Structure formats: structure tokens, C-alpha cells
Amino acid sequence: YSNRSQELRKKPRRMASTMGIEAAAQKLLNPNGDEFDVSLLDDVVNAAYSPTDPNRAMANKALMALQETPDVWTKADAILERAQNPQSRFFGLQVLDDAIRTRWRVLPAEQRNGIKNYVVGKVIQVSSDEALASNEKVFLSKLNLTLVQILKQEWPHNWPTFIPDLVGSSKTSEVLCENNMQILKLLSEEIFDFSRDQMVTQKVKKMKESLNSEFAAIYHLCEFILDHSQRPSLLKVTLQTLQRFLTWIPLGFIFQTNLVDTLLNKFFPEPLFRNDTLDCLTEIGSLADLEPEYDPIFRKLFGGFLARLGNIFSPETDLAQPFENGSEDDCVFIQRLALFLTGFLKAHLKALETPDTQQSLIAGLFYLVRVSEVDEVEIFRICLEAWHMLAHDLYQTENEFKRPGSMTPVLNLGNNGRSNSAASRKYMYGPVLTGVRQVMIAKMAKPEEVLIVEDENGDIVRETTKDTDVIAQYKTMRETLVYLTHLNCDDTESIMLSKLTAQVNGTEWSWNNLNTLCWAIGSISGAMTEDEEKRFLVTVIKDLLGLCEQKRGKDNKAVIASNIMYVVGQYPRFLKAHWKFLKTVVNKLFEFMHEVHPGVQDMACDTFLKIATKCRRKFVTLQTDERVPFISELVETMPSIISDLEPHQVQAFYEAVGCMLSDKGPAVTVDRADLLEKLMEMPNFRWKMIMEQANGNVESLVEPNTIKEIIKILKTNNKTCGSIGSIYANQLQTFFMDVLNVYKVYSERISATIAQQGPSATQLSLVRTMRSAKKEVLRLLIVFIEKSGPPEADPQAVAQGFIPPVLDPILGDYQRNIPNSRDPEVLSLFTTVVEKLKGHILSDVPRIMDAVFECTLQMITVNFEDYPEHRIRFFEFIRAVNSHCFQALFNIHPEHQKLVVDSVVWAMKHTERNISDTGLNILNELLQNVGKTPNIAQGFYQQYLLALIQDVFAVMTDRLHKSGFKMHATLLRYMFHLVQMNQVTVPLYDPPNTTPGKANPAFLRDHISNLLIQSFPNLTRTQVSKFVDGMFDLKMDLPTFKTHLRDFLIQLKEFSVEDNSSLYGEEQEAQKRQQLEAQEAHRSAVPGLLKPSEIIDEDL
């Protein structure tokens, strides 16, 4: 009999196999009245899920096509009953799920009931049989999800008896009850956790109310199981289900029943149930913002929990080893313990600060210190939040009583004074905070500035990518440690120095220990007073320098060097006050610049730049016991210092020295111009050699190595110019004409190559290198113009001496070139020229616009995507001309004037937000400037105003530009009020086609009303009339006008079904800005929270 049945089962498979996958798929898709052949489906599914089957792709395609067939869900019962392959049954459930989610509402009631009854029956059939439920575990969990999908459609309105039915059936069988608990757990998750994007708010609200009203039955079932069941798997799932409910159930079920007692005393001591119980207790302990009458209950819960926890391990137990070697359950327990303790302390810290519970609170915090020591990043981050909260809270309390306005009486009889309570509070937490400081220092995250790291193979390498999680963790740890230092500076210092001693004497020497210690030392810069900082840092820097001499091996030296550089870079206040230390540190950095270990030279140059920025005056003024200012020696010895550096490091070095020379304070007596000349001797010598060679043979300029050398020299000049400021004019004069000639040679060579080989020549290696050199020339000129200023580079002198020679080589080349070889930096250069030199170049603006305007416009108006850099730079240029050389816009050809207005409108309609915002701002500034220029205004209004009003309306109502709403409102209000106040004296209408004597306000009112009625047929004439009347109301200020516009937009059917939050973007941005300002104000008020690099030095 068994052989015969096996043959029968095999027979259809052979037929299906011989039929071929393609034919089988075809038959499944078009059964032609035959019964749906489940065995064929099995074959197709087998092929789809077999990695080696040659028909796999075809089978997957067939399954996707079958899934999209409208009535395939009607075969789901046959598939679930007869399929031999588990994946086929999952396919059957998937099509049923899809039908429930997307077609449920359109199915006849009979079919809906049929599906519902079938799924319920199947769930009961599988879950009632223990052996079957165990074998079909995955299938049953998918079936439960399908049932929950039906519940989301039917319950409570069409299936009000569901909860009573479920509770009733649960009492008939423990196996069935276990699955029912899973269904309740899924239902709670669906309604309270995942419902936001899948169900409308009203439906979710209704389901929540139903679950709330029927929760008594569910709770009594859970209580009954927890009290009476002996089945471990049922008890576990009941605890898990209860945990999902605890976030939202009425508080009476938690605090007016035996639930907490049962969890704490019956289930928490049992290892099998401990983790699930702890989850439940975490939900209860994290309930916040409750009435004060609940505080005693939470105190009792915390005390009871610690008593039970004490039976497992004490607050002194080192958890690092048990976590490392423990089971998965042990690791989960420690993570959940972290969640319980942090959640409880964040919600109820103040409630636990009573004489009766103080001991429990401190014990709980010591447990949290032990958990924080565990070597697991996620667990530590959970604990870190709580430590940050506690340290910040204690600092705030401490600080309140140190402020001048919060004086307390001299006599504090009875110890009731507030300052006493602040001191006693800090004292109470003292021993715990010492433990927290130890953990923070031992686990300090890597700061962004540190470039040298240990890789997974244990090698010391240069960091290649930034880990944003680690940077965020460092920021929180740094703030926590700053607060902890303020609370007890001596303790922080003592821990750090004892750890440093252990590094120096070798007892705790390791790369990681030294790194975390030095990162922690660097992170508390500013948190000590100057005297404390001096005492502390003298020891730290001496010990670190000694350690560097003492240790052997490239990797050891690289790690120590990295830490020295990080620490000294964080303490500019100390270095400024102690010249000998500063000089020693800088000379040490020069040593590190010869160290070829990856990352060391980069960090040395970065740290040198950081110190040069913060301590620049020390280097350019004569210091005690010195013969000359340090910078004089530096420029003499520079060639040997930078001899081993890469080009980008050399550029950073020049930037640092330029930064020193930028200081022109009264105490600075060095000849800055002379030092600049000496500083630039090396690049100038190389430039001179290249130019002499080019004078003999211009072809030498287009050799790849020469071009690369020119790029390096230009970059060095760029960095120097950016940091040294306007005195750079002295250096630029020495090779300015050479630079323009080089630009011209490369431009001509690129144009000739393109003429010979076509537009594709722009991709040739040599052409790209020459374009890079041209871009560097442009960048140098941009930086020079930005930094120009009296006395060395007066705007008028720059406009007369700099602009004329630049115009032809750069502007002429831009205009003549093909679009793909035009550099957007040209537009940036002339934007900077206009912004910086303003009226001094008024006469040159028409020529500049002739060269760049039309040819750029042709590039960017073909579509909204091509040439994105040119696009934004072009509109920035127009905005600069409009703001600073407005008169010049009306000195250009009239056709170009129209093009300017058209281009602004085109920018306004752009889908890129930054371009559309720029367009709106230009239009606003243009209208303001026109209004101040009577000889231009009326002609401008007659030609453009009506079209501009229509264009702003079009952009505002197209639903793609909601973010520009504030500026739309500003522009419309300005233009409508302009007309209403009769400031437009020329007719806006075409006189022959309009009633004689009709005033502009009346014409505009009719024109806009007709325009809106034609564009939005759903609006009534009354609505439009009311809206247009408001537009002309001169009493409306901008906020009222915006509300008027907003209300109108939301009436439009195009907006009514959309997310209109962008219309309130300005208010949201203002709120965010206020929050950021409050955060910044707080950070500025706490010494040490701002990094030294974020502090503006008033004396520089």
C-alpha cells in the first residue's frame, strides 16, 4: 500500500517534469476550465527555489505572473491543503494576504466569510495538535499573520465576538492557548506599533478603543495562565504577549493587581522566564509622567527588584568575564538589565532620592556601572544615555546655586537650605560618579580628529572612512565627562593621572588603553580652571613625550605620536600661556612630519594648522628668552621641515604659516611682506624654472608632469592666500601675468584639440589635466578677490589693476568654448568680483554679462537636469549683479534685459529647491531695487508686472514648490499692494482692448478672478471674490496675508488630499532654529562643552 501511494504521488510529478517548466507555468496561468493543478505549482516552486535548476529564472517569472492573476487567491485553499512543498504553501498564503489587503472591501460578504472561516479553521486545526504545531511552526506563524490581516479589516465592527471567542477557546487546550497568545501579541503590535502607514487614523483609534475595552478578558486569561499553567512554552509566550500590552493598558491592571508581585517573585527568579519577565518589568519601570501617588509603588518595585537581583549577583561583581563566556541568554539578560535600569532611572530618579530608598538607588547605579563595563557597544550606548542624563542633571542642580541671582541665607539651620541639598545630592552620588568616570575614560570613543587607528588585524593604519556612530558616541561621552569633571575636577584628574602612570611604568600599557585615556584627556579641555589645567597638562605632556622616547617600534611610536598630537591640539589656552611648552610641542610636530608611518604626517600637519590658528600671535611676536620671533626661524628652516611631506600636507603647512602671518595686531612687529616673500621662495623658484623653460619652448607647458607641477604650485598659493589675507597681493603681483598666460595657453590648446577631435576630446587625459590647471587658476583668483581689502588690496586698485587683464583670457575663452568645456568656476569668479568690488566694476558688468549670460542660458534652459553646477552658479551671479550693480542691468541691451527677467522666472519654476529659492530671492530683490529707481520703475511694471504676478501664482499652485511658500506670499503681497497704492501709474492692460478710464486695481482684480476661475473649476465665484479682495487688503501684514493664501490653497482640490506641512515650513524652521539656539546657548554656558576649535578668540 505504501509503495502504491508513493507511486501515485510521484506520477503527476513525472508528468509535470516531462511537460517542462514553461508549459507548466502556462497551464497554471490558463487552466482552461481544468481544476487547478497543485502538483504543477509544486514543480514550478521547486525550480524557483533551487539554486542549481537551469529553469530558475523562468520559474520565478511564472510565479510573479501567477501572483498578479486577479483570481489566483480563490485557489489558496487548494494550495494550502494539497501542496507538498512548504514554499508552495507560503505562496498560497502570500496570494491570500494580498487579496485581504487590497481586495477585501470589494469581495462579496459570502466570500469574505468563506476566507475568514477557512483561515480560522486552519489555525485551529494546526494549533490544536501539539505535534503538528511543532512541525509546522513557520507555517503557523505565517497563518497567524494572515488572520491578523483579516482582523484589521473586520474587527471590531464585523466580528465583535473575536476577543471573547479567542479567550473562550484558550481555556479548552493549552496548545491552542499558546497560539492564541501569539495572535494577541501580533494584534497588539499591528495596532500600536506598525499601524501608522497602513490604516487610517480613525480605524486605528477604533481598534485601540476596542482592545482597551476588552482588555479585562485578555488580562484575566494572562493572569489565569501565569497562576495555573505548568507549560513553559505557554508561560513564555504569555509573558511576551503581556510585555506588548504593558505600554498601553490601563494602569489599574498593573498597580491594582498582583501582576508586579507575580513577575518579581514567581517568574524573575526562574532562569527560563527571567529575560521575558525583565522585559515586562522594563515596560512597567519606564512608565513616566505619572501622578505622584504612584511614586511609593515604584520605590517598592525598585527595592524588590534589587533584592531579587542580589540573589543572582552583587553590585561588586565584574560582569565583563561572565558576559564574554556566558550563554546567549546570559548576554540577553545583561542587555535587558541595562534597559531596565536606564529606563527606570530616567523615569523615576527624583522619586528614588528619598532617605528610605537612597541605598537602593545607589546600589542600582552601581549595578549600572558594572553593566557599563561590559565589552559590548550597544549595551554601553544604552547605559551612556542614563549617565549623560544623570551628569547633566547634577551639573544643573549644582550650577543653579552658584549663580549670582540664587543667594541662600548664611545660616542654614535644620539643613533645609537648597544649596545644602545640592551639595548633599552631589555627595550622595560621589562614589557612583567615580565609577562612571573610570568607565568613561576606559571606553572613550575616538574623536573625529584622530586619523590613526588599529585595524581588525591589529595593525596601526590611517583611517579611511569616518564612522558616524562613533562620532555621535564621542560627542555624548565628551559632554558626560565634561559634566563629571565640573562635579569633581580632582577625582577626574586623579583617575587620569593614575592611568597615565600605569601606561608609563608599563603595568597597563596597550594601544587601546593609551588611546582611550588620551581621547578622554583631550575631551575635557576647558572644563578645568586655568591653574588646574596647567598643573594637569604639564604632567600629561611631559609623561607622553617621555613615553615617546622610551618606547621602541614604529607602531608604538605612531600611536603615542597620534595621542600627543590630539591632546596638544585640544589645549590652545594652555599652549598660549606657556611658550616653552608651545615651542617644544611644535618642534615635536616637525619631528613627526618626517615619520612616514601612515597617518602620522597628516595628523602632524592638521595639529600644526590647529595650533597656528589658535596661537598665531605667539609665533609672530618676540617671546621671552628668544632672539627673534619664531616665524623668522621657521621660514628659514622650512625646506628641511617639509622635505618628507606629500603635496597636500605641504599645502596644509603653508596654510598654517599663512595663518600666523595673517595676524596684524599692534604687538606684531615683524615685516610680514618680507616673511611672505621668504615663505614663497620654494614655489616661486619652481614656477620661475617652468616659465624660463616655456619661454624657450611653449610646448613644455603642456607636458603632463609640468601641468601637475603647476597645479601643485597654484594649490599652495591658494592655501596661503586663503589664510594670510589681503597681503597676498604682494605675492600675486610677482606672477599674475604669467598665470593668465598659462590659462590662455591651456585654453587655446583645449579649443584646438576639440576642434580637431570633436566634443569627446574633453574626456582625454591631457585635456582633463589642463582643465584642472585652469580651475586652479580660477580658484586662486576667487580666493584672492574674497580676501582682498585695504591697505594692500584696495577694492578700487583691484578693480583697475586686476579686472582688465582678466577679462579676455577668461571671459573670451568661456564664451568661445563648447558647453562641455566651460568651467562653472568662471561664473563663481565673477560673482565674487561683483560681490566684493561692487560699484567699482559697474562699467565692466555689461561686458561680463555679454560674455557669460546668453551662452550659459542656452546650456541650462534645455531641461532641468544638465549642467547643475553652471545652473546654480549662474543664478548666484545674477543675484550678485542685481544686489550690488543693479544699474548695470539696465545698461545692457534691451533683449538681454528681458532675458534676465525670463531667466529669473525660469529659476523660480525650477524643481531643484536651491535654484527655485534663489530665483524667488532674486525676484524679490529686483522688485525692491526697481521700486527705488523711479526712472526705470514704470517701464518695468508696464512690461513685466502682470506676467510676474501670473508666474508667481502658477508656481504657488503647482504643488511642486510648497517650500517656497513664504517668498510666494511676500512677492504677491508686495506686487498687489504696489498696484492698490497706485504706485503703478502706467496702464497694466492693453488700452485699445479695455474699457477707457479703468484703473489698474480694478483691472487686476478682474484679471486675477477670471484667471483663477478658469484654472480651478471647483472654486465658486464667491470663494474667488473673497480671496481676491483679501489680496488687495492693505491692512494685512505678512503673517495674516500668508494665512489668507494658505486657506485658499487648502481649498483647492489639488492640495486638499496632500501633505501640506511644507506650507508651514517657515514656522517649523523657526521652531527648529530656536531649539538649536537654545542648545548652543547652553553649550556656550558650560565651560568645556564647546571644543576649542568652536570657540571664537576675541583677541585675534
Image (cartoon, rainbow, N blue to C red):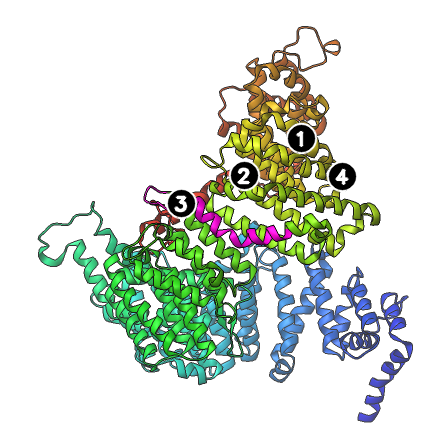
For the point 31% across and 53% down, the residue is 1086
Which element type, helix, strand or loop, lies under badge 4? loop
Q: Locate residue 382, reporting x and y percent.
A: 42, 67
Q: CA distance from mark 1 to mark 2?
A: 19 Å
Among the 4 quarters of the image, the one containing residue 500: bottom left
For the point 72% across and 65% down, the residue is 96
Say which residue label 3 marks: 671
Among the 4 quarters of the image, the one containing residue 367: bottom left
Q: Nearer the viewer, mark 3 or mark 4?
A: 3
Q: CA distance from mark 3 to mark 1?
A: 41 Å
Say which residue label 4 marks: 862
The earlier-in-sequence mark between 1 and 2 is 2
> For mark 1, does the 10 Å Cα neighbourhood hold few (<14), some (14 to 19), or many (20 or more) residues?
many
Callout 2 amino acid: Ile
> For mark 3, does the 10 Å Cα neighbourhood hold few (<14), some (14 to 19), or many (20 or more) residues?
few
* Any part of residue 1035 in sight: yes
For the point 76% across and 73% down, the residue is 79
Q: Locate residue 683, reporting x and y percent.
A: 55, 53
